[in-house]
Amino acid sequence: APPEIYTLSLHDALPICFFERPWDLPSTNLDAAAQALVINETGFCLRALGRLTEAQQPLQVRLKLYVAQETWSEAAITAGNLSELNLTLGEISRAVAMGEQGVEHAARSGDPLLRLSKLTTLANALHQAGHWERSDRIFHEAEAIQAEAQPEYPLLYALRGYQYCDLLLSRAEPQDGSGLDALAASSEEVRRLHHTCDEVRERARRTLEWTLDRFGPLTLALNDLILGRVSLDLAIAGPAAPDREGLARAAEHLDRAVDGLGQSRREDLLPAGLLARAACHRLRGDLARAATDLAEAMEIAERGSMRLHICDIHLERARFFLRQDSVEAARRHLAQARNLIDETRYSRREREALCLERKLSIPAAGGPGD
């Protein structure tokens, strides 16, 4: 349904008809099954609308209900949803804890595909926490389950595949945190990045063949987002200035990614596409379009209290202003990013912040994650 219909039902109908207290106390006029349904649908709609803080309440109620009933499949799904929600909100420690609960409940359910799903949720949370090695091991474990359960599709695909490729690409980026600024890296790091980009591109090619006729705009958009990031990395991994043709290829993929993420109505994912495209615009020298993408990403992220996205936006804005030699503006945005990294323990971004602090001659405030 169009988002305005969800908004109408949530703002008007649900509080009046279905809840004693929004969004955690359904009406006593409903039986237990109807209460569970209302709680479930409300959590889904609030999350789709980007109202993430409110979405936690019905999900927490639902999780307690399912654990009490020992309905382990539903408990695993709900714990996984809470993990993803807390991750976007920047509650990374809680996201990891809920991810571990999801894996535990999924194991009790006896469903291997459900366990696969919850393993990838946990692995993604660990990645953002900066636990690179453990995240990689868990993604490998999940992919082994995938290959056994669906031998015709031996690789993680759709959102899970995107999250694994995200880890692979971030692990291959220069250890000094220079990332997309300029590949000031050793020849060994450049070779590693090229090897990883080739692997990720092949993964994207194979999984696109499987999903092209089976999934909607979200899966296709995430595929384009990964391919856009690969093209972006390769465009700046050469010996000279960023490759113009490579940046143009990246822009094509990222335009499609942003359009698809918008069509999918996943506001929790759209800022990632806008941020990647903003970086591409910056590297191409199109600062006006970069500024537009950053403003749209910030509007979405602030509306949903998406602190990890907000942190990423401040980091990209620091690079944006550094490109214009606006040092004080870059320092202001980097300071806000640093505060969020420290508050949320967003250790994945620690090395990028340290790199920018060195460029801006700011004393380091923290250390890399383990």
Image (cartoon, helix red, strand yellow):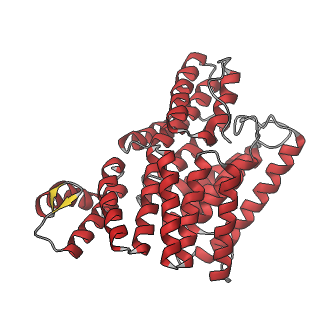
Say above or below: 303 vs 108.
above
Question: Where 85 falls versus 101 (above or below)?
Answer: above
Residue 247 appears left or right of 264: right
Question: Quarter-wise, where is residue 159 in the image?
Answer: bottom right
Q: What is the x, y in percent for residue 41?
A: 29, 66
* Residue 215 seen in render: no
Q: Residue furthest right?
A: 187
In the shown orientation, is residue 298 left or right of residue 187?
Answer: left
Along the line of sight, the residue nearer the viewer: 105 or 339? 105
- The spot of residue 50 in percent (x, y) is 36, 51
Residue 347 in view: yes
- Quadrant location of the C terminus in the rendered image: top right
Where the N terminus falls, by quadrant?
bottom left
Point 70% across, 23% down: residue:
358
Q: Nearer the viewer, residue 305 or 97?
A: 97
Using the rendered view, name the quadrant where residue 202 is placed: bottom right
From the top left corner, tell me how far across and down residue 106 is, in percent: 50, 71
- Residue sitting at 63 percent across and 71 percent down? 208
Q: Residue at x 21, y 73 (%)?
A: 32
Give the number of marks: 0
| Residue at (55, 56) in percent of width and height | 257
In the rendered view, tell whether residue 190 sits above or below residue 107: above
Q: Position of residue 256 (x, y in %)?
A: 55, 57
- In the displayed structure image, the side of residue 270 where residue 208 appears, left or right: right
Q: Is residue 111 above or below residue 224?
A: below
